[in-house]
Amino acid sequence: EPEVTQTPSHQVTQMGQEVILRCVPISNHLYFYWYRQILGQKVEFLVSFYNNEISEKSEIFDDQFSVERPDGSNFTLKIRSTKLEDSAMYFCASSGLGGQGETQYFGPGTRLLVL
Amino acid sequence: EDKVVQSPLSLVVHEGDTVTLNCSYEVTNFRSLLWYKQEKKAPTFLFMLTSSGIEKKSGRLSSILDKKELFSILNITATQTGDSAIYLCAVYQGGSEKLVFGKGTKLTVNP
């Protein structure tokens, strides 16, 4: 069964460093998403991406964040200058048609720890 | 502020018990509600509910939506230790692509 994959599974970085989290969405999907879950808190939406551009983003997704689809398979989240409060589990998701009511399928997550 | 509230936050049962997990929501322009099961890795999709009163069923799991009272329940009958997980409820609003999640219910099934 097709699944979303993410690398790395764990990432430890120093405050102020840049990190890139990678995702391979399900191959025929068109919409891609990033969510994060701070320990003990809810899963929160960061951004959605369609047709090579951001289609929606949350207040959390500020200028230190960016997303890219550098080739036909990968989808990346870059955090330019990490802060302690960026420590969280980051989930990538994808859906076939996106938008209102389409099921989003999640990857296993990357646990980011900023020291 | 839009919100999705799940209850209970945690639940411990014995194998064979039946459990009911609750999800209430207050969101503008509700579109659909989804249930996910989160074990150690990816949240895995269980159900999507759009219409009131229509039960979705998969094996020992079932779910129903009440759009008048703004809630959904997830039932698990004859629980097994493999059902131990966090169960997440999430809601789609019309005009938005994001899922709004509740905090989840942590279910522990003891042998």
Image: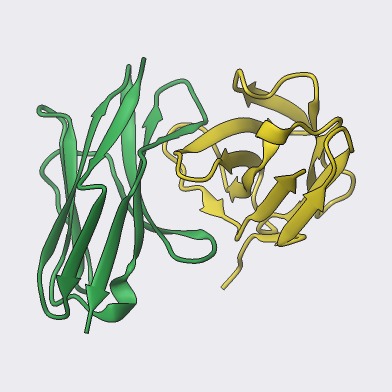
Chain colours: A yellow, B green
Position of B28 relative to B92 (above/below): above
Position of B5 relative to A24 (above/below): above
Q: Quadrant of residue A61?
A: top right
Q: Quadrant of residue B68?
A: top left
Q: Is residue B94 visible?
A: yes
Position of A91 relative to A8 (above/below): above
Say whether residue B20 is left or right of residue A11. left
Q: Is residue A50 visible?
A: no
What residue lies at 64% left-to-right and 30% top-to-bottom? A47
What residue lies at 74% left-to-right and 53% top-to-bottom? A23
Relative image position of residue A79 (x, y in whole percent)? 81, 34
Q: Residue furthest front?
A: A115
Relative image position of residue A115 (x, y in whole percent)? 77, 43
Closer-to-camera residue (A75/B109): B109
What residue lies at 46% left-to-right and 20% top-to-bottom? B95
Closer-to-camera residue (A87/B64): A87
Say whether residue A29 is left or right of residue B57. right
